[in-house]
Image (tube, helix red, strand yellow):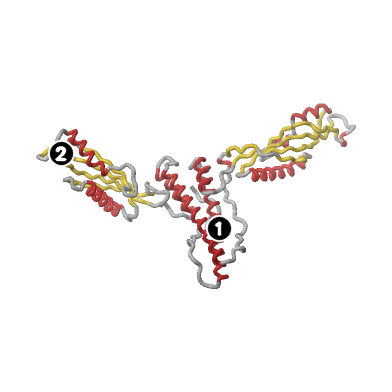
Amino acid sequence: MRRVGHGLGYYRPPGGAAVTGGSPADQVRALHAETTAAIEQRAALAVEARCALIVALRSRLICRPGCEDALATWGLDPLPQRWTISVGAQLVYTRSHTNYDEAREQARWGVPDELRLLQPAMAVYPQHVIDVAPAPDGEGEPGPRRYCITVQVTLQTWATAVREADAHDAARTTMDAHLRALAPAGITLTRLTWQTADGPDEAPPDDIDTDARPLVGAVNLTDVDGLTAATAARDTAVKAFTDLRRSIRARAIRALVDDEFGGIYQRAAQRVNQFLVDLGLDPLPHAHHVTVIADLTLPVGDGTARDACDEARDRMRAVTTSSPDKARPWTAYGWTIPENATVDQDGWRMPWQHEYEMWLRGHATPADATTAAETIVRGDLTRALAGIDHNLVRVSVSVESHGIDFHLDPDSD
């Protein structure tokens, strides 16, 4: 996702710290300054986040339901929709015709070409002819005559906007521009009667504006003069800004966790990471992707070879997990190697290979991650196999990659 809009100053909220020093009036002024900064920064962040989402939607990096859900989660304006705006009007123009009947017939079914060529597009539907009268300036001349024609029409135009009121404003702006353009051709539209909008319909992504709207107006805090009230206003503003930052981050991480993007994880994670960084939020945590394979033998009693395999699997179930959690942030599974099993006076000793896959944060180098991973695996096996006369033959560790952690928690990361 690329950066859009006017940019943020990235105000870091003071977190509700008490303002001390100076007179009460000075403290109130300082609180007002912090309140204003937090409110303006939240508004700027809201604009930037919404625009960045729309850019991603237009680039087909995210789907429309995901975009709409994120905007709703953050309490931001929804995506614009396509509104059909209709208006009744009287159309007046002058055209040449061979006789009165032809003028009336063509007025009933057609309109001047200038109306058909308007941009942005506008559809014009004649409803009924009000009047057809010979133009006074052509009376007595041979050949076709000019007629002044008045027709009741319905016009339709289309506007992309979040709200119907905004769509009507856009349609009126378009109509005003059209009236000025039609005047030199002797075409007028009067007695405009605006109707309730039809729709809305889903607007194509390419029709959705991605420009950030500039912030206007100042925050008025003149009615918050007391120190207690000013502190409460500051804390409320800071909390609203902090909550929006947290909500944006959590929803972005949730999209990764739920695989809303599909495809290769690291590519999607890098786009989400850039989205967060461009908004002034902390980058996603990085980690080393490490694979550890432990080779060991287990005493599994006597019986058949199949019994020995089943007992080995039962004993290793305690260190098998397919769902990482805070206690065991890895996946681990294993398998027997029956062809290498041996038998002694105490029964079978079954070879077992156990593979761990983990993402480790906070290690500067792959070597540090390798050391940490081996320590984790040895500790996990020691705890799970306490009291069992197992033999840990070998621990092999390899760092697969370094990138954004695969196991992210929307609530804490």
Furthest toward the left, the residue is 345
- State which tag comes first along the sequence, 1 or 2: 1
Marker disc for residue 301: 2
Amino acid type of the residue tagged 2 in the rendering: Gly
Q: Residues within 10 Å of mark 2 (few under 14, many from 20)?
A: some
The residue lying at 53 percent from left, 55 percent from top is 42
Toward the right, the furthest residue is 140
Q: Residue at x 18, y 34 (%)?
A: 307
Q: Which residue is painted at 62% across and 44% down in the image? A: 163
- Assign a secondary structure to mark 1: helix
Please name which of the two marks, 1 or 2, marks the residue nearer to the observer: 2
Q: Could you tell whether 245 is left or right of 162 in the image?
A: left
Name the residue carrying label 1.
39
Q: Position of residue 213 (x, y in %)?
A: 59, 51
The one nearer the camera, 243 or 62, is: 243
Nearer the observer, 197 or 134: 197
Q: Is residue 315 left or right of residue 223?
A: left
User: What is the three-letter code of the residue carrying label 1?
Assistant: Ile
